[in-house]
Amino acid sequence: MPDPVDNSPALWAEALNWPKPDGNKYDRGHAVVLGGPVASTGAARLSARAALRGGAGLVSIACDPSALMVYAVACEAVMTKPVKDAETFAELISDPRITGVLMGPAAGVTDRTRTLVLAALQAGKSCVLDADALSVFEGAPDTLFEAITAPTILTPHEGEFVRLFGKVTHREADAVAAARKSGAVVVLKGRDTVIAAPDGRVVINKNASEWLATAGSGDVLAGLCVSLLAQGMPAFEAACAAGWMHAEAAYLFGPGLIAEDLPDQLPRVWQGLSLGHNGFNVHG
């Protein structure tokens, strides 16, 4: 295993997809977020807002028809798409303009979630899998791994990691082993988040603020991951960039942070990155 390196813009800044003067929203990618049920809409809304602030040109929430009005009222710039089953979900994401799919935040550990995750993976879409989209494969992780063929990012906290890969004894080595086994980039979240690629590359994100230990912050991170993935960044670089930008947004806000504050700090992060990473104040 290569020695871990500290995450910084020097690793991924050249892969960022900056808007072009003659571009349009479709050039910026279309991210779809799988929404949770009517009583659990907050996580997907956080993810969708982060995906917009992360630069995706279009973001849609795909949800059960019973939850459609909740999402439609709460999300101004986010489109809402009713999805009643795997067939309608597969039809939605078959649009070639959809370039990234996020599943898991408050989706529910249900057969429906499992079926929709497999439908997206089998469609060959670039995917981010978080939370319930990981936990639903506890006891049958190979079913998930065998379906991964396109660029995919897994974003487990330690408990979710254990459900798929077993006990964590050495975070860096275990994350690399998990990435190789699954064929996906693995973002093992924690105080120092570990980002590992199937080819053995491993990066440690050390710029996190203690204020990130708040409900919903992981949903924002997942939304930022799918935003960058949908814009065409390679999965490893997208995960590294998302981790660093997420932590920097928290640092810029400071004490009293809640998850809702994070997406609205991203413009400041983008402004700093636009100056070039050597001129940006990177906090350790």
Image: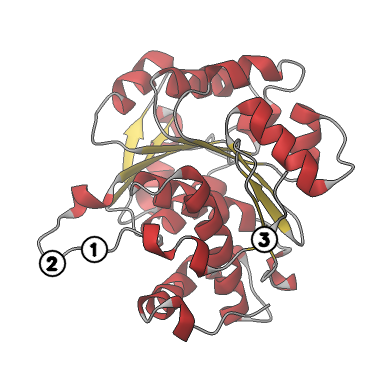
Q: Mark 3 belongs to which amino acid? A: Val
Q: Which residue is drawn at 64% across and 74% down?
A: 257
Q: CA separation, marks 1 and 2? A: 7 Å
Residue 10 at what x, y percent from top left? 50, 68
Q: Mark 2 belongs to which amino acid? A: Pro
Q: Is residue 258 visible?
A: yes
Instruction: Give the quadrant of the N terminus.
Output: top right
Task: Looking at the image, tell me whether mark 3 or mark 1 is earlier in sequence order.
Answer: 3
Q: How many C-alpha atoms fall within 10 Å of the one at disc 3: few (<14), some, or many (≥20)?
A: few
Provide the residue designation for mark 2: 21
Residue 178 at what x, y percent from top left? 71, 33
Q: How many C-alpha atoms fall within 10 Å of the one at disc 1: few (<14), some, or many (≥20)?
A: few
Q: In terms of depth relative to the viewer, which is nearer, 51 or 64?
A: 51
Provide the residue designation for mark 3: 5
Provide the residue designation for mark 1: 19
- Image-based side of 164 in relation to 133, left or right: right
Q: CA separation, marks 3 and 1? A: 29 Å
Tag 2's secondary structure?
loop
Instruction: Give the quadrant of the C terminus.
Output: bottom right
Above or below residue 248? Residue 58 is above
Tag 1's secondary structure?
loop
Determine whether label 1 and label 2 are within 8 Å by CB.
Answer: yes
Residue located farthest toward the left when viewing the structure as drawn = 22
- Image-based side of 201 in relation to 44, left or right: right
Task: Looking at the image, tell me whether mark 2 or mark 3 is earlier in sequence order.
Answer: 3
Q: Is residue 108 visible?
A: no
- Image-based side of 181 in relation to 55, left or right: right
Q: How many C-alpha atoms fall within 10 Å of the one at disc 2: few (<14), some, or many (≥20)?
A: few
